[in-house]
């Protein structure tokens, strides 16, 4: 049986005095965030984990 689940990550906040937006949130920060999701979901069994996909929607950084 295939395991299906969904998790939504919403990043809000400020960088210094500026609200986060695509102009001040770097792609490296997104990559690190997604790595943290993998660590959270599969802390022990990375080799056996299912494929993790993502969908960046309108309004996303």
Image (spheres, helix red, strand yellow):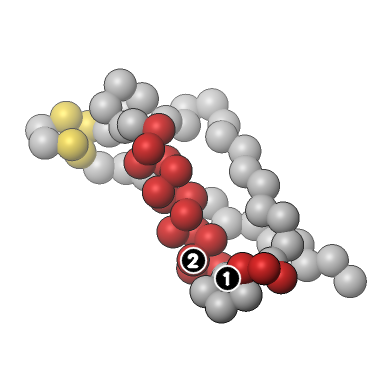
Question: What secondary structure is found at the residue carrying circle 2?
Answer: helix
Would residue 21 be found to the left or right of residue 8 on screen?
A: left
Q: Quadrant of residue 54?
A: top right
Across and down, in percent, residue 37 comes to 49, 59
Across and down, in percent, residue 20 comes to 27, 33
Q: Nearer the viewer, residue 11 or 42?
A: 42
Q: Residue furthest bottom?
A: 44
Q: Nearer the viewer, residue 51 or 19?
A: 51
- What residue lies at 37% left-to-right and 38% top-to-bottom? 28
Q: Nearer the viewer, residue 6 or 29?
A: 29
Across and down, in percent, residue 46 comes to 61, 68
Q: Quadrant of the C terminus?
A: top left
Q: Residue furthest left?
A: 17
Residue beneath disc 2: 39
Q: Is residue 9 above or below residue 20?
A: below
Dot 1 surroundings within 10 Å: few (below 14), some, or many (20 or more)?
A: some
Give the Cα separation between the discs numbered 1 and 2. Answer: 5 Å
Q: Are the two marked residues, 1 and 2, in contact with CB atoms closer than 8 angstroms?
A: yes
Residue 42 — which label? 1
Would residue 22 be found to the left or right of residue 8 on screen?
A: left
């Amino acid at each position: 049986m295939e395991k299906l689940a969904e998790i939504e990550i919403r990043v809000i906040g400020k960088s210094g005095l500026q609200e986060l937006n695509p102009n001040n949130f770097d792609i490296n920060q997104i990559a690190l965030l997604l790595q943290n999701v993998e660590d959270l979901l599969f802390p022990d069994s990375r080799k056996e984990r299912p494929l993790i996909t993502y969908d960046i929607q309108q309004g996303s950084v």
